[in-house]
C-alpha cells in the first residue's frame, strides 16, 4: 500500500486540542481557580422546547413498527429540505428543495466537497482562517494562496484581479474575526469568480448572528452567485446543535463546469459515501423552522448576542482595537504581543481563556479570539476580570 | 475550477434507485397488487426497548443546561468506545478504545478511509460486490482488479499469489452473496496481505448474523490481522440503526506504512473532516451493549434469521442453487436467466422483488439477491408465491 503522503505535510497538533491541553494542565496545577472558557466556539444553552418536543416524538416513532424509519434519502427527507427552502425564501432567496443537501454538519461537507475537484486547482484562503479550509486542501496536495484579513482592509479582504484563484473560501460572519461582508463586497467576489470560472465555498455557519442588520446572510442574496457558489450552513450555532449534528449545503442547478452540474456530482458523492442524517435529528431540525422553534432559537441567539455586545463594550472601555461581536459571535482583538504569550498571561492572571490568533494563520499573530457562546454570568465575570487586570497592569 | 474527471467514469444510476423506480412504476400501473419487497437490505423491526429508553434519557439530557452536551470528541465518546472494546473482548479480540472510531455508519467510513491512500495503489475487489467499494475507487481514479466469487469457489474467492493487490476488500458475511469465510480462509488472506504490505478493508457489517456458528465475526480473530487490516462495522443490521446512523471502524496501532500509523492518519482525517456522531445516538448505541440491549437485539436478529432459514428451505424445495441465508441475512440464488429479466418476471408474476445480481458486478449476472430483513408474514407469503409460480411454470 502507498499512503497519501500529503498527510505528512500537516502540522501534528490541532489548534483547539493544544488550547485544551494547556487549560487542563493549568487546572490541574491550580484546582482552586475558576477558569472561564472563551476559546472554543461551543454553545452553552440547551436545546429549545420545540426541538426537544420534536425529538421526543421522533424517538417514539422509532419505537413502533408502524412509524419506524429505516434508510432515508441520503440527501435528507423532503420535510426538512422543504423547511430549509422556506427559510431561504424568507430572505428572498428562491431555491428548490433538490438544491439542498442535509448533512451531519458544515465541517463534514466543507471537507468532503473537495472530492468533486481535481487536485490541479489554485485555492484561495483568507488568513486568519478556520483551519479546516487549509488542512483539507493540504491533505489533497493542492496549491494554496492566502489573502490577508487585517486592519488595513477592515478584516474583509477583496479580490485581487491579478490573482489566479479557482476555489475561493469565504466565511461571513467570519470565524475567527467576526467581520461581515456587505452586499457590495460580496458582489465583487461573485463577479470575480464568475469572470474567471472559479467556485466560491461560502461558509454561512454564523448567518443567524447578523440579526436585523442590513447585511447578507446568504451568498445567494447576491445576483450571479448561483453560477459560482456553494453554501455551507449548520444548525450548530443557529439552534445549539453542536452535539446534535445537522447542517445543510446548497449546490445550485446553475453551477456547472463545462456540461457537468456540480449538484449532480455532489448527489453522486453523497449517495455513494454517506447514508443520511438520523431521522430523529432531521425531525429536530425541522422543528427549528416552526413558529415556536424560530421564536425560541432567536431568543437563544439574542442571549449570545448580549454577550457579544458586552465584550465589544468592554473592549472599547479598555481601548483595545477589535472587530466583530455585534453581528457575529466572535470578537477578534488586538493583543499587542505574541498571541500564545497572551493566552498564557490571560489564563494565569485572569483565569480567562481565548484562542490565540496565530492558531488561525500567520496573519492572526498579534490577535486573540473571544467567543460570545458562554453564559451571561461567566461572560460578565470574565469582562470584570479583564478590566481589573488592566487597572493593575496598564500594559495589558 | 477543474472538476474531478473521474466522476465522469461512474455509471449514472445507482442500483437501488433503478430497482425502486421499477417498483414504483409497477405499483402505479397495478394499484391493486400487494408487492413484497425483498430487494434493499433495510430492517423492518423498530428499535428495541433498551435503545428507546436510552434515547429518551439522552433527549432529556439535551434539554437541560446541566446535562446538555455540545461538541463531543470526533472519534466518539469514551463510554461508547469502551463498550465496543468490551464487545470485541467477548470474542477474544483485545482492542484499546483508542483504536475504535465511532462514525455515522460503515458506508461513510468505507468511502472516507480511501482519503488516507495514494491514488497509485492496486485495488482488489470481489465481484459481485457492494457497489460502494467500486464506485469510491473509480472516484479516485485507482486501478481496480476484480476477483470472481462464483459456484466454483463456493462464492469465497481466495488470494491469487501472482496478483499485485495493495488494497483488498473483503466482506464476510458477504453482501450480496451471504457466503461466510472460515478462520483458515481469512488466515490465507491475512498472510497474503502481510506478505506483500497490502491493507485489507474488512466489512463486518453483518457479523451478528453468524450467530453461534464457529465462523469468524471479526478479522481481528485472525492472528496477524492487526498489521494489515482495518475493520468497518455498524449498528445498522445488529440493532436496526439504518435510520439512526451509527457505526464504528477499527484501525489498530500496529497497522503502519513505513513509520506512519494509519490510526493516526485516520484520527487526523476524522478530526479535520468530521464532527462526531450525535450524543443521543451514541447513548442509544451504548445501550445495545447492556445485558437488556444484547438480549433484545439478539432476539431481533433471530427473527430475521428465521426468515433466512425459511428462504433457504424454500430454495431447496424448489431445487434452486443458492448460498447464504443461514449465517447471513442475504440469499444469493441462481436465477437461470438474465437477472434484470428475472426481476421483471418475479415482480409481474409473483409481486415479489429482489435485487438483480448484475447490479453487483459482471459475475453477478445469472444470480438474484433476496434479503431476510422483511417481516416473517411477508417473507412466508413471498415464499408461497414463489412455490406457486414454480407449479404453474416449472421453467421458473
Image: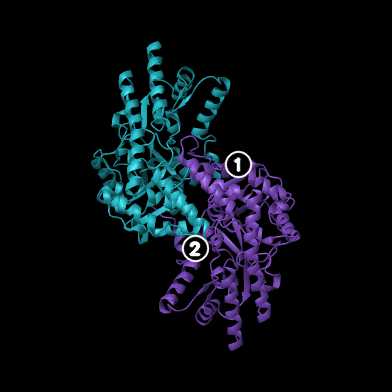
Chain colours: A cyan, B purple
Q: Which residue is mark 1?
A: B79
Q: Is residue A144 left or right of residue A8?
A: left
Q: Residues within 10 Å of mark 1 (few under 14, many from 20)?
A: few
**Considering depth in this image, is B332 or A51 the residue closer to the camera?**
A51
Q: Is residue B26 above or below residue B200?
A: below
Judge whether residue B323 can be spotted in this image.
yes
Chain designation of label 1: B
**Considering depth in this image, is B33 or A181 the residue closer to the camera?**
B33
Q: Is residue A45 left or right of residue A7?
A: left
Residue located at (37% from left, 12% from top): A391
| Residue B235 location (% of width, % of height) | 58, 54
| Residue B132 location (% of width, % of height) | 54, 60
Q: Is residue A42 above or below residue B203?
A: above
| Residue A200 location (% of width, % of height) | 35, 47
Q: Which residue is mark 2?
A: A66
Local SS, label 1: helix
**Considering depth in this image, is A383 or A61 the residue closer to the camera?**
A61
Count up the numbered dots: 2
Amino acid at each position: 500500500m502507498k499512503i497519501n503522503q500529503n498527510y505528512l505535510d500537516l502540522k501534528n497538533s490541532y489548534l483547539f486540542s493544544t488550547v485544551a491541553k494547556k487549560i487542563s494542565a493549568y487546572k490541574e496545577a491550580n484546582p482552586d481557580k475558576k477558569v472561564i472558557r472563551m476559546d472554543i466556539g461551543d454553545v452553552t444553552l440547551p436545546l429549545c422546547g420545540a426541538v426537544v418536543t420534536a425529538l421526543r416524538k421522533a424517538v417514539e416513532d422509532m419505537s413502533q413498527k408502524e412509524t419506524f424509519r429505516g434508510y432515508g434519502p441520503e440527501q435528507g427527507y423532503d420535510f426538512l429540505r422543504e423547511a430549509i427552502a422556506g427559510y431561504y425564501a424568507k430572505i428572498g432567496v428562491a431555491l428548490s428543495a433538490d438544491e439542498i443537501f442535509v448533512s451531519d454538519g458544515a465541517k463534514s461537507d466543507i471537507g468532503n466537497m473537495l472530492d468533486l475537484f481535481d487536485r490541479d486547482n489554485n485555492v484561495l484562503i483568507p488568513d486568519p482562517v478556520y483551519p479546516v479550509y487549509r488542512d483539507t486542501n493540504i491533505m489533497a496536495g493542492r496549491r494554496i494562496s492566502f489573502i490577508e484579513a487585517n486592519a488595513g482592509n477592515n478584516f474583509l479582504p477583496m479580490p485581487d484581479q491579478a490573482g489566479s484563484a479557482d476555489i475561493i473560501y469565504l466565511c461571513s460572519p467570519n470565524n475567527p474575526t467576526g467581520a461581515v461582508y456587505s452586499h457590495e463586497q460580496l458582489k465583487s467576489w461573485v463577479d470575480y469568480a464568475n469572470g474567471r470560472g472559479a467556485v466560491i465555498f461560502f461558509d454561512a455557519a454564523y448567518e443567524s448572528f447578523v440579526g436585523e442588520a442590513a447585511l447578507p446572510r446568504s451568498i445567494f442574496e447576491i445576483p450571479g452567485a448561483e453560477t459560482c457558489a456553494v453554501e455551507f450552513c449548520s444548525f450548530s450555532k443557529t439552534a445549539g446543535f453542536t452535539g446534535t449534528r445537522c447542517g445543510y449545503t446548497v449546490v445550485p442547478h446553475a453551477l456547472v463546469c463545462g456540461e457537468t452540474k456540480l449538484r449532480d456530482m455532489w448527489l453522486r458523492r453523497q449517495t455513494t459515501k454517506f447514508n443520511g442524517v438520523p431521522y430523529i435529528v432531521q425531525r429536530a431540525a425541522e422543528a427549528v423552522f416552526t413558529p415556536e422553534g424560530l421564536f425560541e432559537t432567536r431568543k437563544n441567539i439574542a442571549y449570545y448576542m448580549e454577550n457579544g455586545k458586552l465584550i465589544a463594550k468592554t473592549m472599547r472601555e479598555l481601548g483595545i482595537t477589535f472587530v466583530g461581536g455585534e453581528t457575529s459571535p466572535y470578537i477578534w482583538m488586538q493583543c499587542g504581543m505574541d498571541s500564545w504569550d497572551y493566552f498564557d498571561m490571560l489564563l494565569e492572571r485572569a483565569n480567562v481563556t481565548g484562542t490565540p490568533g496565530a492558531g488561525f494563520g500567520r496573519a492572526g499573530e498579534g490577535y486573540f479570539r473571544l467567543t460570545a457562546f458562554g453564559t451571561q454570568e461567566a461572560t460578565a465575570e470574565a469582562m470584570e476580570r479583564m478590566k481589573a487586570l488592566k487597572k493593575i497592569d496598564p500594559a495589558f
